[in-house]
Image: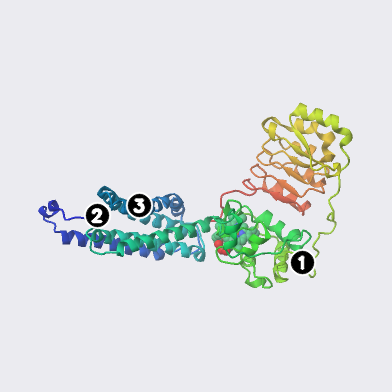
Amino acid sequence: MSFVTQRDPKTRSRGLSFAALRKSYWVTGVLLALALLSLPWLLSPDGQTHGSWQQFLGRFHPLVVHLPIGLILLLPVLEFGGRFRSAWREAASVVLGCAVLCSAGAVVFGMLLAHGGGFSPDAVRIHMWGGLFLCLGVIWCALIRPSWAMGRVGWVYPASLIVVLILTAWTGHQGGSLIYGKTYLTEFAPAFIKRLQPQKNYPPVDPASVYAMRVQPILDSNCLSCHSGSKIKGGLQLDNYAHVMDGGNDGEVVSPGHAEKSLLLTRITLPADHPKFMPSEGKPLAAKDIAWIKGWIQQGASPKATALPGMEVRAPGAAERIPQVGDYNALTPQMIQIEKTLGIRLDRVSSKAADGLILRTIDVAPKFGDSDLARLEPFAPYIVNVELGHTKVTDACFASLAKFNHARAIHLEDTSITGRDLQKLAVLHELRYLNLSSTRVTHQALDQFASVQPLLHIYAFNTPAQPSSSPIK
Ligand code: HEC
């Protein structure tokens, strides 16, 4: 698009009248606007994933989208400065031209992302139309600005610019919420700002409740890779009660007392090949897990209720209280010695010996191997948390680990284990947490092991057992 702000004698001498030039300028603008308006139909976000090239290009949207934002914010500054220096005004017309091109680009990439990446239409609709109207607004500004520069349309251009600025802020916020979740902006805001927004106060979760004992552990092991931390797919976080109840981009996902109306249950009970099925990667939930979630919602989705009719909240035989470890104080001299020799730390969980020790290898991780672990066996019965992430240990470590009979958490993330001999950990009855992420642990090893340790939360993100890339097209 070209921008003509003044009658240029040279153009006339080439035989193109000013009126004709202005007409073609408007025609170009209107055609561009119509082309953009057709995109929601050509590339409709229907919730399915489409073609990898669309997804590839679409992922440039977050990058490209910042260009028009910067240019649009610069415009009022330049226009204002133009009152004092005419060069600024000329710069504004160039910046506006670039803003048209960049925002049209951002819309196209955005539509490709929404269409290609399987975004739910409901979630993406508001942001999509916001972006589209914003782009049309920028085109409109570019079309009327030449007249404004000649003093014809008065306040229409400044007013349009203000609308465009407001739309920019609003659409940007909608886009941010889509990716990072609705509470992203205010999550760490000072309390007085948080008080300004409508807050839902949920009662605290009872640690002995159906929710804490049964529902959250199911979400923890199956959903958090996409619904917590920096990955908040569908605007939904599932890492605690308040987040679950807050829902996602489509609103609430749990409707207390109405399991059949709850999106959370709908998504996990669809046919497994349905594009909306959850978890969208990894194993479908076991029938037993679905029964817990369904029962919990049906009974009112309470954070406190400790019983469900006909279902035993605590698994038979599960430990009611945390078993205590023996007194390691008599071993203190040997502990200090081994800490020095291996460069590891044996930290006390609390001042009570019965609460056990934490083995920390972080300072020496790159050189800590199986033989070092074997040397810690005399202290094994006192260690409740075994941190071996990023160390050199191999599958041979399981023989030693089996002696950590009070271990509740074992970290093996980012090691070279494959899960051979993982079975040896079946004797660890107090084990509740096992992190095998970013290892080479296989499906077979995991499946066999999970069946003997039903209370265990196993994390196997980014492994052959649970690849990080989607197998679902
Ligand atoms: C591999 C990634 C992944 C995993 C694992 C996953 N989800 Fe999702 N989930 C997504 C994506 C992507 C979306 C957004 C697209 C859509 O709505 O299908 C989504 C959306 C949702 C929504 C809709 C939210 C809304 O308001 O639109 C629900 C409900 C949901 N997931 C539940 C679950 C549950 C329950 C689990 C665990 C059993 C789970 N998801 C595991 C990727 C995942």
Residue drawn at 68 percent across, 54 percent down: 221
State the residue lying farthest toward the front: 84
What amino acid type should be assigned to the residue bearing mark 1? Ala
Could you tell which of marks 2 and 3 lies nearer the N-terminus? 2
Mark toward the viewer: 1 or 3:
3
**In the rendered image, which residue does mark 2 sit on?**
3
Tag 1 near tag 3, CB within 8 Å: no
Element under disc 3: helix
Depth check: 326 or 118 in front? 326
Residue drawn at 69 percent across, 35 percent down: 362
Marker disc for residue 158: none
Up/down of 151 relative to 352, above or below = below
Ligand 1 in which quarter: bottom right
**In the rendered image, which residue does mark 3 sit on?**
77
10 Å crowding of disc 3: few (<14), some (14-19), many (20+): few
Mark toward the viewer: 2 or 3:
3
- Quarter of the image for residue 407 reads top right
Q: Would you say the beta carbon of the disc 2 residue lies within 8 angstroms of ligand 1?
A: no
Residue 279 position within the rendered picture, expressed as x and y whole percent measured from the top left:
62, 58
Residue 236 position within the rendered picture, expressed as x and y whole percent measured from the top left:
59, 60
Quadrant containing the N terminus is bottom left
- Structural distance between the alpha carbons of marks 2 and 3: 19 Å
What amino acid type should be assigned to the residue bearing mark 2? Phe
**In the rendered image, which residue does mark 1 sit on?**
305
Residue drawn at 78 percent across, 30 percent down: 339
- Structural distance between the alpha carbons of marks 1 and 2: 67 Å
